[in-house]
């Protein structure tokens, strides 16, 4: 596990995830995954939670597609440096606020909305330019299997790692050095 975290940290420090174009491409790939594999995602949610296709689609898939579109439409503005008011000490300087990615972020999914509560934080982490360790809920096994199969096909594997299983098999993910945690 430690090697995996270090690998992600090296990939993050290389700067690959920082350019706006890369972030937009990853978000578009995630949208493509949801659109192309919608039937697989809905079947997995139905198998895990006995949700109807209509409920799963309206509560999980539409939410994710809307979030991705929102990020795609606003990300260019969000990553642009924002000038700030200068004072006596900074009047000759260039003063601005620049949003910066955190580094390696751990996302732990929930069982009750296994797709949306795993992918929504992933969207934010990608948009922010972070590397990600994604750990879905082991209680929603079918959704976890679908995500394990699909995410490596669509996202950069050097910046997005996928872990399954109960915490003892995960090598204490929460105790590892990382820049943020979402669950």
Image (cartoon, helix red, strand yellow):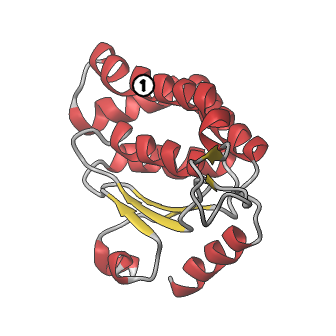
Pick the front one: 136 or 182:
182
Q: Which residue is mark 1?
A: 61
Q: Residue pushed farthest top?
A: 54
Q: Residues within 10 Å of mark 1 (few under 14, many from 20)?
A: many
* Number of marks present in the image shown: 1
Residue at image coords 52%, 26%: 70
Determine whether the residue tagged by mark 1 lies in a helix, strand or loop.
Answer: helix
Q: Position of residue 68 (x, y in %)?
A: 54, 30
In the image, residue 102 sits, relative to residue 48, either above or below, namely below
Residue at image coords 61%, 82%: 6
Q: Which corner quadrant of the image does residue 47 belong to?
A: top left
Q: Residue pushed farthest front?
A: 88
In the image, residue 65 sits, relative to residue 121, either above or below, namely above
Q: Position of residue 77 (x, y in %)?
A: 64, 34
Q: Position of residue 85 (x, y in %)?
A: 56, 48
Query: Is 92 displayed left or right of 136 in the figure?
Result: right
Residue at image coords 31%, 55%: 137
Q: Position of residue 34 (x, y in %)?
A: 55, 29
Q: Quadrant of the C terminus?
A: bottom left
């Amino acid at each position: 596990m430690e090697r995996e975290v270090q690998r992600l940290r090296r990939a993050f420090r290389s700067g690959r995830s920082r350019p706006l174009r890369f972030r937009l491409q990853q978000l578009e790939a995630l949208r493509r995954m949801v659109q192309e594999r919608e039937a697989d995602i809905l079947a997995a949610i139905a198998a895990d939670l006995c949700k109807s296709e209509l409920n799963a689609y309206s509560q999980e898939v539409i939410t994710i597609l809307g979030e991705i579109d929102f990020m795609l439409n606003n990300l260019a503005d969000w990553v642009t440096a924002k000038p700030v008011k200068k004072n006596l000490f900074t009047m000759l300087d260039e003063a601005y606020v620049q949003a910066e990615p955190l580094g390696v972020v751990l996302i732990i999914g929930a069982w009750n909305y296994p797709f949306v509560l795993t992918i929504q934080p992933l969207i934010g982490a990608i948009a922010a330019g972070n590397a990600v360790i994604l750990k879905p809920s082991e209680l929603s096994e079918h959704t976890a299997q679908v995500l394990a199969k699909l995410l490596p096909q669509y996202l950069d594997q050097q910046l997005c790692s996928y872990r399954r299983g109960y915490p003892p098999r995960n090598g204490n993910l929460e105790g590892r050095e990382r820049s943020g945690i979402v669950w």
